[in-house]
């Protein structure tokens, strides 16, 4: 069995895919906080059939080392994957392919496994990313903007009279909390819809939406949409099948 790790800016998601099943079928899955990285050893103890670990890490070397130490307790090492020029049917048009975030690259590969038409791959987490993938598998480029919660905290932290808002989206907000939340959500939705415009007229074009803020963003998007759980893990599974070893980050 293989265990997949998505070490993100906020939490660590893990999954063990069912062998020979459709993408997204899991024997087990879960998440850990950064402080719980050592608990990966317990996950491995509960699943002694795991013989390989493949992951992406955008949270820094210290977290990677903590996860690696937990894996080493079971005689395993982690294959940390990074972006490359091509993998699993996706080609990378970044000017320096290896500079693309490992999580974005994995999400693009996961999207390609789920959808063969043109798509916009959106991950709405600590940051929101929107990456354009052609029908032929070419990643054309994408954007990064502050995630919803980061936008809300920035307003609260950098303005004298705007609190950290616990409001709701409204078409015409009539209180400050709703105005803040509605403004931040509209900014997210507007950026996504603008990025979708180049493929909006193409057949079978979709937006694939993942991440912790996906449920709040989805109702505002006026485009063909599919919400996807564990998109990075899906992509890591595809990467593991396509390249049995590497490319990896130390």
Image (cartoon, rainbow, N blue to C red):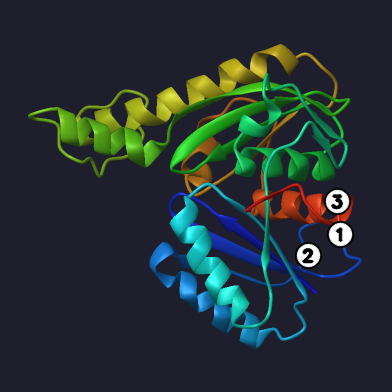
**Disc 1 secondary structure class:** loop
Residue 132 vertical position relative to residue 227 in the rendered view, above or below: above
Say left or right for 225 vs 118.
Answer: left
- Which residue is labeled 1 in the image? 22
- Residue 31 visible: no
Q: CA distance from mark 3 to mark 2?
A: 21 Å
Q: CA distance from mark 1 to mark 2?
A: 6 Å
Residue 137 figure quarter: top right
Q: Is residue 242 left or right of residue 49?
A: right
Q: Secondary structure at mark 3?
A: loop
Residue at 75% over, 78% down: 50
Counting from the top left corner in percent of width and height, residue 7 is at 54, 56
- Image quarter of the N terminus: bottom right
Q: Quadrant of residue 244?
A: bottom right
**Can you see residue 123?**
yes
Residue at (48, 43) in percent of width and height: 125
Q: Nearer the viewer, residue 215 or 118?
A: 118
The residue that appears at 51% across and 27% down in the rendered structure is: 144
Q: Nearer the viewer, residue 177 or 214?
A: 214
Closest to the observer: 140 or 52? 52
Task: Identify residue for label 2.
Answer: 25
- Residue 142 lies, in percent from the top left, at 61, 23
Q: Position of residue 193 (x, y in %)?
A: 58, 20
Which residue is identified by label 3?
243
Between marks 3 and 1, how big is the CA–CA gap?
A: 19 Å
Q: Do labels 1 and 2 touch, CB within 8 Å?
A: yes
* In the image, residue 118 above or below residue 17: above
- Label 3 CA crowd tier, 10 Å (few <14, some 14–19, many 20+): few
């Amino acid at each position: 069995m293989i265990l997949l790790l998505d070490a993100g800016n906020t939490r660590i998601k893990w999954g063990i895919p069912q062998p020979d099943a459709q993408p997204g079928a899991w024997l087990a899955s879960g998440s850990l906080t950064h402080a719980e990285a050592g608990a990966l050893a317990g996950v491995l103890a509960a699943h002694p059939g795991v013989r390989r670990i493949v992951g992406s890490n955008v949270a820094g070397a210290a977290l990677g080392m903590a996860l690696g130490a937990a894996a080493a307790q079971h005689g395993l090492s982690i294959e940390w994957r990074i972006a490359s020029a091509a993998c699993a049917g996706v080609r990378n048009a970044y000017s320096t392919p290896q500079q693309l975030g490992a999580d974005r690259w994995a999400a693009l590969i996961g999207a390609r496994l789920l959808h063969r038409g043109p798509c916009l791959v959106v991950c709405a987490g600590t940051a929101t990313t929107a990456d354009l993938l052609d029908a032929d598998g070419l990643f054309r480029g994408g954007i990064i903007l502050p995630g919803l919660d980061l936008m809300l905290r920035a307003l609260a932290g950098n303005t004298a009279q705007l609190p950290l808002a616990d409001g709701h989206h409204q078409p015409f907000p009539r209180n400050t909390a709703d105005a803040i939340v509605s403004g931040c959500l509209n900014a997210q939705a507007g950026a996504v819809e603008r990025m979708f415009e180049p493929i909006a007229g193409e057949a079978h074009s979709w937006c694939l939406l993942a991440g912790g803020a996906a449920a709040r963003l989805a109702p505002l998007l006026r485009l063909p949409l599919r919400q996807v759980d564990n998109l990075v893990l899906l992509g890591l599974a595809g990467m593991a099948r396509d390249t049995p070893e590497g490319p990896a980050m130390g």
